[in-house]
Image (cartoon, rainbow, N blue to C red):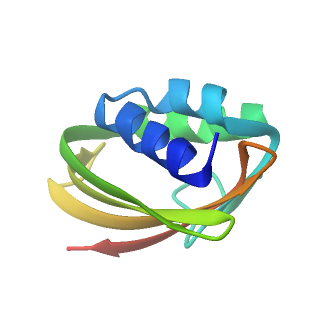
Amino acid sequence: MTIWDIGTKLVQLCKEGKNLQAIEALYSRDIKSVEAMSMGTGREAEGMEAILGKTKWWFDNNTVHSATIEGPFPFDDKFAVYFNYDLTPKGGPRTTMKEMGLYWVQNGKIVREEFWYKGT
């Protein structure tokens, strides 16, 4: 699969709410994830189980009312995806969250992801 194919599949699955399936299908077993800030689970996670765990934690701790996902925006061995969420964190007020994800691909699998946020 090309960078475009992998990015397009990630966006498609996320739009369908199948984020965990996207991880299982498209990520390397040795994936590394880096967040701009800790959301309660630390800034960095390594390995498939850790990434699945942090993703489950995020969905368990946020009610997503809607999501807009745009991309992919490919460049060489990476691509970016733009996420815009309308959500309510557990114990918090309803808010929006804008997030940009940057994904590195090697040998047909996502090997690294980094996230930047803008809350409103």
Residue 8: x %, y % from top left: 44, 44
The image shows residue 98, relative to residue 30, as above or below, that is: below
Residue 3 left/right relative to 105: left
> Which residue is at 30% across, 37% downward?
15
Q: Is 68 or 107 nearer to us in this picture? A: 107
Q: Is 44 or 19 nearer to us in this picture? A: 19
- Quarter placement of the N terminus: top right
Residue 73: x %, y % from top left: 43, 65
> Which residue is at 69% across, 65% downward?
77
Residue 46: x %, y % from top left: 80, 48
Q: Residue furthest front?
A: 2
Residue 111 left/right relative to 6: right
Residue 84 left/right relative to 21: left
The image shows residue 28, relative to residue 79, as above or below, that is: above
How many numbered marks, from 0 up?
0
Q: Is 46 or 83 nearer to us in this picture? A: 83
The image shows residue 108, relative to residue 102, as above or below, that is: above
- Quarter placement of the C terminus: bottom left
> Which residue is at 67% across, 40% downward?
51
- Res. 60 image quadrant: top left
- Res. 14 image quadrant: top left
Residue 12: x %, y % from top left: 36, 36
The image shows residue 111, relative to residue 56, as above or below, that is: below
Q: Residue furthest right?
A: 30
> Which residue is at 33% across, 75% downward?
118
